[in-house]
Image (cartoon, coloured by chain):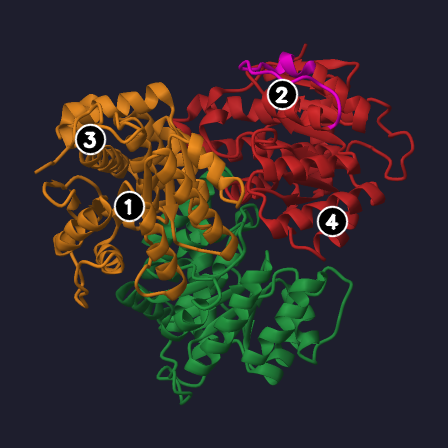
Chain colours: A green, B orange, C red
Amino acid sequence: MDVAYTSEVLARVRATNPLVQCLTNSVVTGFTANVLLALGASPAMTDVPRESGPFAEIASAVLINTGTPHAEQRNAMAEAAKAAHRAGTPWVLDPVAVGSLPVRTALARGLLDFRPTAVRGNPSEIIALAELGGGGRGTDAIDTPDDALPAGAALAASCGAVTAVSGRVDLVTDGTRVIRSASGTSLLTKITGGGCALGAVTAAFLAVAGADRSGGEPADGPGAVLNATAAATVVYTAAAEMAAESAGGPGTFAGLFLDALAAVDTADIERRAALS
Amino acid sequence: MDVAYTSEVLARVRATNPLVQCLTNSVVTGFTANVLLALGASPAMTDVPRESGPFAEIASAVLINTGTPHAEQRNAMAEAAKAAHRAGTPWVLDPVAVGSLPVRTALARGLLDFRPTAVRGNPSEIIALAELGGGGRGTDAIDTPDDALPAGAALAASCGAVTAVSGRVDLVTDGTRVIRSASGTSLLTKITGGGCALGAVTAAFLAVAGADRSGGEPADGPGAVLNATAAATVVYTAAAEMAAESAGGPGTFAGLFLDALAAVDTADIERRAALS
Amino acid sequence: MDVAYTSEVLARVRATNPLVQCLTNSVVTGFTANVLLALGASPAMTDVPRESGPFAEIASAVLINTGTPHAEQRNAMAEAAKAAHRAGTPWVLDPVAVGSLPVRTALARGLLDFRPTAVRGNPSEIIALAELGGGGRGTDAIDTPDDALPAGAALAASCGAVTAVSGRVDLVTDGTRVIRSASGTSLLTKITGGGCALGAVTAAFLAVAGADRSGGEPADGPGAVLNATAAATVVYTAAAEMAAESAGGPGTFAGLFLDALAAVDTADIERRAALS
């Protein structure tokens, strides 16, 4: 994974406008859709039963976020994950507050059966999710992304997912390789949806990552999912850094961040990427 | 329909603050309410059964948007449309993704029985809706607003609705007359709710268009609904043009657009209206 | 209640980041979360049954807002209010449109049994709520905050709540003492959530007001709830005044208001507080 690949995948998103279906929490729907639009993707929040499944078959990618899991949406999520799995549509699971709350924890356990392409969350959510999958270890500490590395390996083993963990230094792993990205700004933690929308951006990047929907080798090679997931983080945090430089606080930052997502280019990515 | 009428109807909205009930999708509720407030109208998102019907009787106008049609909201929408129809409250239908998705398509078919005052959508949605009403013809092409003209005529014939079709050149028709409006900015397509909120603004304009709730001749004449619907588009796109001139991208555009909706005046409308 | 106490409670919010659970309407979820984040609190919109109760036991404070009361959320609200009452978690009720609409009116009647710590609304909502509690008197007039003073006394008597009434001059009362605050800007009425988010801020201030969860005397004295509720109004309206000075309209105001909530300090509060 390098800067050139990041720029190339971003260019594909802008050229092909992948259709990203989002079943997400009620707090961040608008912001998530605006992030996808700014990036060049096409959002669709199709999250009712009998529509979510057929839509997941034709969508370019799917995001499922467990933030406000009302009963009807839970059914729609199960339907969408199942359809995405069958159709080979890449899909991202964002297990908001899984582990500490019972309804979403049971929901996430069921969703893992449909093998998410990638999982994105904070360290404690990732650790809790991995336990549901039969691996990983709980912790009471304030976790850092590196604390979630064993959980990432467990998720790779149990359901084949690439794991992205958010923190001061973001981390992406497929259980074998680890990519760390240090760009970003703490302002992302002062607006709602700062993490959730990255899940949607990850879905957009997976949509164009050259993955073969028939299950064969991705055109971008065996590391395509890992690399595209990391590329999403790099673009997202580089744009956030750009916005932070002229923001007067979290309110103006949110608008400037969308502007930056629409404007970020190869030179910006080269200047700001901090990969290791 | 001319610029003078557009300014006059806008002035009435600002003077009387019509109460616009919105039953809309979960992605754009906040933005839609903010657009109505900036314009001078009073939004109310009353969308639960047993409240939506009584409220539609007293509201100045109603918007029904099928973007995220959860079961309870579907029931509330049917109740509101029925009550609006009976009480003579003008109401607008925005058939988001109707035609391609089954739940909302069935919903829209039922809502047409309550004869929307106006319908607003993109070309393919309008064409799909007209087919439900028994007229119009399907198309697989990428549609332009003019492609939807026969569908507009069909909707006028089957349910008496004026049709507004969004595109690079917007189009409003009552099946006989056609008004085209070329003002606007592509940034409206880069923010979520850019189309949906126009449905709410259309409802606000219909509320003050001199339509007679008893079913008689509108005070503004037989073309009142057509003219008010076109006026809503002109004000909305003129404000969008103003905002685009100083926006740095879609994020700052959204805020500046609300500022412009609050500030747009007769001189701005005269300068920017591009009617034919 | 004075400026020094206001600054002190704000500093506690920023130092301890209280976890504020919000069960609120679908229009303002995003804005409410952003207001809490800007202030320094931690929002959590946990509003599904079987999660809302357990969460209310561990949350620092709870907000319940009746703006879009869907059936599942109504159940979650009852569960959360009951749990908050039992656990001693301070909670705020914002009775949006109670009185005029049946579903939320019945909901609010039931919620009063769990004795909200504070109630926030406009005058007519407060008057309607007090009638449900067995006190107060209805009115058909356009009400001012002072018109709701008897209702505030009735709510204090019937359920022990402090009442905050929004208007050009805001008013807070425990039935005995009355605090009036004249800072603010009319732009708060031109953005959706301008009132609703104050309910969430009030919850955040109550969380750190030294109230004893075991039911004993608050550390901040017997007037702790009254004083913290008034302090929330002062901080909120002072920040709004700051934002209004450089806003070009309601759209840019919303972003600048969040910036101001993150930046407002003791000097700002001293300069802008207008208490009586």
Residue that lies at the very extreme toward the bottom in this rendered image? A216
The front one of C244 and B109 is: B109
Q: CA distance from mark 4 to mark 3?
A: 50 Å
Q: Pointer 2: what residue?
A: C269
Q: Is residue B164 left or right of residue C60?
A: left
Q: CA distance from mark 3 to mark 1?
A: 26 Å
- Vertical relation: A96 (above or below) C156: below
Q: Pointer 3: what residue?
A: B224
- Vertical relation: A272 (above or below) B116: below
The disc at residue B243 is: none
The three-letter amino acid code for the residue at tag 2 is Ile
Which region of the structure is painted magenta? C133-149
Residue C137 is one of the magenta-drawn residues: yes
Quarter location, residue A120: bottom right
Q: Earlier in the sequence, mark 3 or mark 1?
A: 1
Q: Pointer 1: what residue?
A: B188
